[in-house]
Amino acid sequence: MAKKEVYTDLWVHELLKEANIKLTPQGCNINEINEALKTASKSKTGNAGYPEYCGVVKDFVLVIEDKASLDKHVLYTTENIIDTENVAAIKEYAVNGALYYGLHIIRNTSYKKVICFGVSGNAKRHRITPLFINERCDLYPLDDVETFVSFSEENIQEYYHSEVLKEPTDVEKTTEEILKEAAELHEYLRTYGQLTTEQKPLIVSGITLALREIKYNNFSIESLSGDSTKTDGQKIYDAIKANLDRANVSPDTKKDKILSQFSVIKDTQKINEIEEKLGKTPLRYYTEFLYKSIFKNQKYKSSAEDYLGRFYGEFMSYSGGDGQTLGIVLTPKHITELFCELVQLKSDDKVFDPCCGTAGFLIAAMHNMISQAKDEEEIRRIKEKQLFGLELQTYMYVIATTNMILRGDGNSNLRNEDFLKQNPYELQKGGYTVGMMNPPYSQGTKNDPDQYEIHFTEHLLDSLTKGARAAVIIPQSSVTGKTNEEKQIKANILKHHTLEGVITLNKDTFYRIGTNPCIAVFTAGISHDKNHKCKFINFEDDGYSVSKHIGLVETPSAKDKRQHLLDVWFGRIEAETKFCVETTVEAEDEWLHSFYYFNDEIPTEEDFERTMADYLTFEFNMISHGKGYLFEEGGNSNGIL
């Protein structure tokens, strides 16, 4: 084996280890497969032949062949078929060799599903091409991947259903159901309640709190009878109050503020009167609907998914843009979870979100920290003493508080206050070690520069302890410094804090909002060293795509691409400059991958041959059309090029 190929083998081994996949090198620990490989010689002599790695995950056989050179990735026949007949092609090309072994295993074992991988190159420049083979030896070419994480015990079944069978995954089904139910509920709220944009999510979150009292026999859906003496709204309101008491929401002023927002439930006459078409009050109708759809999800699904946030986002999409006018852009679940990984969240961190919206970041942080906790005491401490947030909009604050209570946060350390009016040095006393934020968008102007997203970022950094990690998701325009005020803020940030890097995101991350976002990551309280190298990553291809009638959905490649991002971010592997540029920065720079990117990729022999073929084709066409003079020295006498 060539020395370079050994390095490729070792890199592939590390990728498998990272994905927690155990395959056998140069053989297979499954006796039936190992026996079959004893006649799998690439020379087709009937002797033994072994791929670089082979093994079984669930009921899938995984086969890997690798080559050190990208030029030896795959060879096709003139009919554009991967060549498995030519011995030289099988021996010299990664994909061809992997497919050859995969077909041999299908034909000579009882296994019915094989995924073979042709791998070429190294950690920085490579291709990993999977192919699926079924029991009839039908071949399914699949998109290239960056890691093997999609083929782990936890993920391989989902990958198979989505990428091979082309069926909707459980995640897609759940998302579609949530959005469908949100649309239905919005329609019911509009038709039977004539409620405002602010009132709709309050109705949803208030009823959800009331439903929690069913288990304590303090509330029942059957009690909502349309009684005019004690209205359905009053019964729901009383149950909300009981649940806030049970959740130990304090002080009383906070509880009173929350209850005042929920008074819309008892004070709105139309939703408390029996509606003729429904044969019941709209409130009972909403309660039955929420019990069946949302409450069950809230109570039984173990997920960082911000269900109320998803519902609220759907309400906003139907409401004529009110949410965008207010600068409200709710953060998708996959971004809130990515933040936890980028800041390397630990179970003893104190997390602060000063623009918490529906508390999506805090919910993701809580789930992440609890997963690391050693015992119940640590879990209780995380819920009660390590999650903090501010929210300016009162009704959003109530929704956030409700969302945290529903997740059992124990205390809900949220405050209904204007972040920008807080003294950052007073906030520092909170000892926050991690900051996460999605600030209001498009509110800043030259006359009001404090509302710029980059100013929110600076204010957050100033509010954290020295050495704290912070991540913010903001429009790309925020880090380019398009106004003098923003340029000055960027310079001030570098004076007091360290920029670690910026990740350019998928333009559809905030689907239907029309914002091109990025994630900026900082270390607070430590001045940016001029020699410090930041990472600028182009993560526009994140494995999420827009699905008709659903919106932004996760494809199976998302896990793979996210793992690759994290590997590059934490320096576990190198990456091509088209994905990541590592460089020093100045305040005047545009802190984006596109600003620093340069193409350092050395053309391959195939690139050279392709370019020469294109040139010769062009020359032949010109000559055949009587323009051979173009290729004579000095051009033509008329000076025409």
Image (cartoon, rainbow, N blue to C red):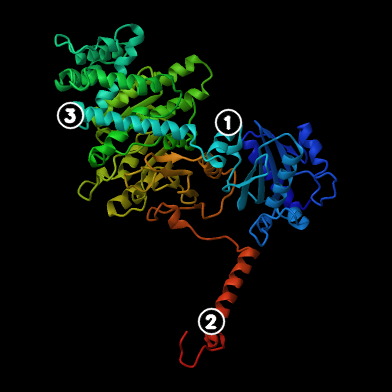
Of the two numbered discs 1 and 2 on the same chain, state the one appearing first in sequence.
1
Q: CA distance from mark 1 to mark 2?
A: 57 Å
Q: Amino acid at mark 2?
A: Met
Camera-side mark, 1 or 3: 3
Residue 568 versus residue 466 in the image, above or below: below
Amino acid at dot 3: Gln
From the viewer's perspective, is the residue at label 1 or at label 2 nearer?
Answer: 2
Q: Nearer the viewer, residue 147 or 215?
A: 215
Q: Nearer the viewer, residue 253 or 15?
A: 15
Looking at the image, tell me whether mark 1 or mark 3 is earlier in sequence order.
1
**Mark 1 nearby-residue class (10 Å; few <14, some 14–19, many ≥20):** some
Q: Secondary structure at mark 3?
A: loop
- Give the x, y percent position of residue 273: 16, 18
Image height check: is 580 above or below 437? below
Residue at the spot of label 3: 194
Residue placed farthest to the top in the image? 217
Q: Quadrant of residue 34?
A: top right
**In percent of the image, x 37 and y 38: which residue is there?**
461
Q: Which mark is residue 622?
A: 2
Residue 467 seen in the current view: no
Measured Cα–Cα span from mark 1 to mark 3: 45 Å
Q: Earlier in the sequence, mark 3 or mark 2?
A: 3
Q: Which mark is residue 163?
A: none
Q: Residues within 10 Å of mark 2 (few under 14, many from 20)?
A: some
Per the image, the residue denoted by label 1 is 154
User: In x, y percent, where is residue 581?
Assistant: 51, 53
